[in-house]
Image (cartoon, helix red, strand yellow):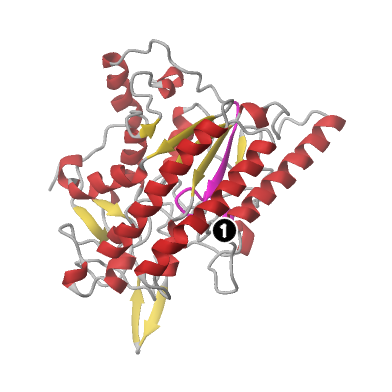
Amino acid sequence: MASKVSAPIFQVLGLFLICSPLANAIDFNYPAVFNFGDSNSDTGGLVSGLGDRLDPPNGQTYFQKPSGRFCDGRLIIDFLMDAMDLPFLNPYLDSIGMPSFRKGCNFAAAGSTILPATPSSVCPFSFGIQVAQFLRFKARVLEIQTKKHDKYVPDEDFFQKGLYMFDIGQNDLAGAFYSKTLDQILASIPTILSEFEDGVKELYDQGARNFWIHNTGPLGCLPQNIAKFGTDPSKLDGLGCVNSHNQAATLLNLQLHTLCKKLQGQYADANVTYVDIFTIKSDLIANFSRYGFDQPLMACCGVGGPPLNYNSRVSCGQTKVINGTTFTAKGCNDSTEYINWDGIHYTEAANQYAAMQILTGKYSDPPFADKMPFLLKLKF
């Protein structure tokens, strides 16, 4: 068994702090964060919006119960919020329990796409809808603040000073493979990114000036896609991932990077940061044992056992009867040994690793490895 990556994220980053200069550190003291995305950063939006539910063992590692996240615990965005000394983001559609939006709001929803949703879409809250929700959110906040200061919503200047985070596009590609050829999918990428650019421009026109954009991870390495599209070994790469899916993700990321450079030049008064999630996750999967994991591709919570432990008909925590046999998708004994949680999403341990790599600054454009701004607020 590989040695565990069990050191808290702050301890690891603290060592980096000792070894790295902080001269000319940029200001990452954002008063609020506004996030747009899919299940990679959804903290409960889809569950709240559609009235769905997630069953245990979802949430078991950190929250001790399902939290609306498609994970055994925290997501990358949770670790990033923690590193910025900000509370976890509440989903925009969560109305119960007097949620505070003082430090920002999460518009992400699992299954969402950049392109407008269709009748067959898993989620109706596409990127354009999320931007529209933000506009409604901002308008209502300003209306409230003009009447009486409310400690549960952001101040007006938070909208300009805040950080706007994006992690979306995975489902535009993944869903398309069920009905389109690879060439058709590759040809659709400019349209996808044009829709994304329109949304970013609308936010910029509303005063947003700090943009943090994640690219898409290695889709071909998700058990869901391997099970469906990787039955022919010739379709897999050396890691056991589906070539076509990773090819599509790579092209989307190249064009997204180009778009970010365009936005950097177009919006001279804005900060646009592109974050290479694909490289971080691909390296994790390729070198899993080096980073303390035992299972690079097999799902922790699923049905079927090795090599993937995934069945599309039985989601994590569910029990289904298939051809007279009862199947229950149970969690593994130790999720820290697994990179993948449920066949589609990553475990908290993998998310923690990815966040640690993001915070080194070397996977960003522009990079901030020589500045390590997040470390300014760490609590040890």
Query: Callout 1: helix, strand or loop?
Result: helix
- Based on the displayed image, in which of its 4 quarters is residue 269 positioned? top right
Q: Is residue 300 visible to us here? A: no
Residue nearest the observer in this picture, 242 or 347: 242
How far across and how far down the image is residue 378, in percent? 42, 21
Left or right, residue 10 beside residue 282: right
Q: Amino acid at mark 1?
A: Leu
Q: Is residue 184 above or below residue 161?
A: below
Quadrant containing the C terminus in the rendered view: top left
How far across and how far down the image is residue 100, in percent? 66, 38
Q: Residues within 10 Å of mark 1 (few under 14, many from 20)?
A: many
Residue nearest the observer in this picture, 227 or 206: 206
| Residue 33 colored in magenta in the image | yes
How far across and how far down the image is residue 232, in percent? 20, 75
Q: Is residue 58 above or below residue 228?
A: above
Left or right, residue 37 beside residue 201: left
The structure residue drawn at horizontal position 54% and vertical position 63%, both measured from the top left corner, is 53
- Based on the displayed image, in which of its 4 quarters is residue 296 positioned? bottom left
Which residue is farthest right?
147
Left or right, residue 211 beside residue 328: right
| Residue 193 colored in magenta in the image | no
Q: Is residue 344 above or below residue 305?
A: above
The structure residue drawn at horizontal position 34% and vertical position 24%, both measured from the top left corner, is 369
**Which residue is tagged 1?**
46
In this rendering, the count of numbered labels is: 1
Which residue is farthest bottom?
324
The structure residue drawn at horizontal position 70% and vertical position 37%, both measured from the top left corner, is 206
How far across and how far down the image is residue 238, in percent? 15, 58
- Based on the displayed image, in which of its 4 quarters is residue 224 positioned? bottom left
The structure residue drawn at horizontal position 56% and vertical position 33%, both measured from the top left corner, is 266
Write the start and end of the magenta stretch as one range: 31-46
